[in-house]
Image (cartoon, helix red, strand yellow):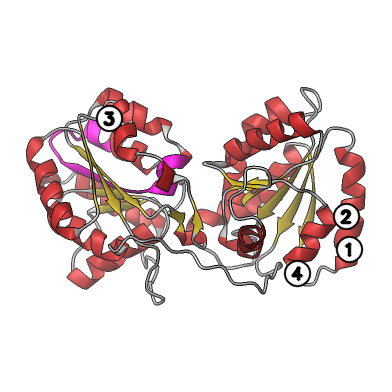
Amino acid sequence: MKVEKLVEIIGADFYSGVPDSQLKALCNYLMAEYGIDPHHHVIAANEGNCTALAAGYHLATGKVPVVYMQNSGEGNIINPVASLLNDKVYAIPMVFIVGWRGEPGIHDEPQHIYQGEVTVKLLEDMDIATFIIGKDTTDEEAEAAMAGFRDILAKGKDVAFVIRKGALTFDGKVEYKNENKMVREEIIQHIVKASGEDPIVSTTGKASRELFETRVANGQSHKYDFLTVGSMGHSSSIALGVAINKPDMRIWCVDGDGAVLMHMGSMAVLGANKPSNLIHVVINNSAHETVGGMPTVADSIDIVAVAKACGYPNAVSVDNFDDLDKELESAKKRNELSLIEVKCSIGAREDLGRPTTTALENKENFMDYLNSSAGN
């Protein structure tokens, strides 16, 4: 189905969401049609944020908004859906468009398998009526589904279109780029060199994939790294938990701007606890690059100032490798919580692979290293 037709069928004029590769056609269409326009299209920090923003739109206009997301975001919407939107509370109608990663029978990454199994069930448990769109869904079927949805929305209830892989198409082209020169994979190579045998907790997406391949290229073990392949926005909290309980080890967190924004409250907790053995590196390309390159708001905020306001005793920003190397070494020597923001370009090599070890193997190897004599 052409995404333009689905948008026409839904008939809404406000969309908010967190980008998803399964919904790339929709994301690219919205960027081509509206860009980032607070009256029509907002990319928010997380899916709960999108839902609350859309609720405010409804309160102000009386119209029905649309929230789009990967199915991994269902966890973030449970609270506002159950305690804000539900017809037993404020009865705020909303259309959700959910990319179905990990659909049963379709090969996907481990972090999507269980989420895929429960995607429709979670929506139904939240009293959200669903309609699944696949490659063979006709315009007429989608129109009939939306006609039924309008009756449900009129009662202050919520509905969802669940989008199978490849179900939506968009022929337009959208280019995502910035002016930064540093390439993320090279940044990670510099971090690996500086970190030596210190443990690294890396964020979800291409950063973890590039860390894995850097170890392969160096002939190094993967035992040093915990690859947070899912749970976007939580790698820094994982690193904090490790750092507190391994005070004699230096712990590195390789984070991304989209992940930091998604759960920025974790920075306040980090700053309040001030683990002296944690170095937090935020690679900032101001984009949700792993799922297509759509922008984040990270280019309009001061991450260093946020870190300092949260209590980080050290926070700097770099945009070249000489300064990066200098700040990595300084962070190693000072033994205080440190944040290094690294301004990064958008893009990765096309042949970038994925981890060849399972998530369970990664966890067990990492835990063994943390508790081995070599890691103490």
**Residue type at numbered disc 4:** Lys
**Which of the 4 image quadrants contains residue 233?**
top left
For the residue labelled by badge 3, is the local secondary structure a helix, a strand or a loop?
helix
Q: CA distance from mark 4 to mark 2?
A: 16 Å
Q: Quadrant of the N terminus?
A: bottom right
The residue labelled by disc 3 is 308
Report x, y in % for residue 66.
Answer: 72, 46
Contact check, label 1 and label 2, Cβ < 8 Å: yes
**Residue type at numbered disc 3:** Lys
Q: Earlier in the sequence, mark 1 or mark 4?
A: 4
Indicate which disc residue 141 carries. 1
For the residue labelled by badge 1, is the local secondary structure a helix, a strand or a loop?
helix
Contact check, label 3 and label 2, Cβ < 8 Å: no
Which residue range is magenta in the image? 242-261
Residue sitting at 69 percent across and 70 percent down? 169
The residue labelled by disc 2 is 145
The residue labelled by disc 4 is 2
Decide if residue 275 is on the left or right side of residue 128.
left
244 is higher (above) or lower (below) than 253: above
